[in-house]
Image: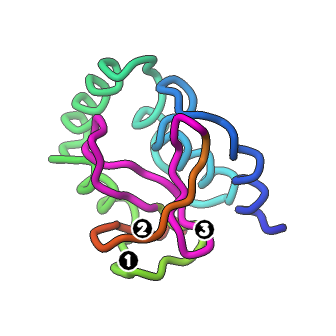
Amino acid sequence: MGQLDQFLSDHAEKPFSWSDNNCLGFVRSALIFMGKDNIPSEWCKGYKSKTAALRAYKQNLAKYDFKDIIEAMDDRFDRIFTLHPRDGMIASRKSESVMGYAFGITHNKNCIFVTEKGLRSFSVEAGDMFWRAD
């Protein structure tokens, strides 16, 4: 079993939580586990509710002078335009979330996202975005 396989197995049943298992927190933990470049902790920690997450998101956009989370990710990581992502890439998909996007990690040509029931694998869709974190 590879490094990413082990991380995903260890986190498979951990459900979404604003305080300790939100989408950016999950991505940050995966990147740390793989020894890759990372997301600042203030982007994904320090809040316990959707309202607090929205407040933190807006404060961080202003602090770093970004218009949205996609611009922030583009500034920090190399975006790759593909429908066939490599394992361990950061994945993003439009959603009805606080940031307007859900974030996850790629594995076996799919996107792994945190849900209320734990990690779930979704097929890549047109419009998904991917970044290399190494």
Mark 2 residue type? Trp
Counting from the top left corner in percent of width and height, residue 40 is at 45, 42
Q: Which residue is mark 3?
A: 107
Against 89, residue 73 (above or below) is above
Q: Residue at x 15, y 47 (%)?
A: 67
Q: Residue furthest left?
A: 67
Q: Which residue is mark 1?
A: 80
Quarter occupied by the N terminus = bottom right
* Magenta segment, prevailing SS (helix, strand or loop): strand
Mark identifier at residue 29: none
Residue type of the residue flagged with mark 1 = Ile
Mark 2, other Cα within 10 Å: few <14 / some 14–19 / many ≥20:
many
Label 1 vs 2, first from the N-terminus:
1
Q: Secondary structure at mark 3?
A: strand
**Residue drawn at (20%, 47%) of the image:** 68
Residue closest to the eye, 70 or 104: 104
Residue located farthest toward the right when viewing the structure as drawn: 1
Q: Residue at x 52, y 27 (%)?
A: 17
Q: Earlier in the sequence, mark 1 or mark 3?
A: 1
Q: Mark 2 highlights which residue? A: 131
Q: Distance of mark 1 from mark 2, alpha carbons?
A: 5 Å
Q: CA distance from mark 3 to mark 2?
A: 13 Å
Q: Are marks 1 and 2 in contact (CB under 8 Å)?
A: yes
In the image, which residues are magenta?
A: 91-117
Which mark is nearer the camera, 1 or 3? Answer: 3
x, y percent for residue 110: 53, 69
Q: Residues within 10 Å of mark 3 (few under 14, many from 20)?
A: many
25 over 93 or under it: above or below: above
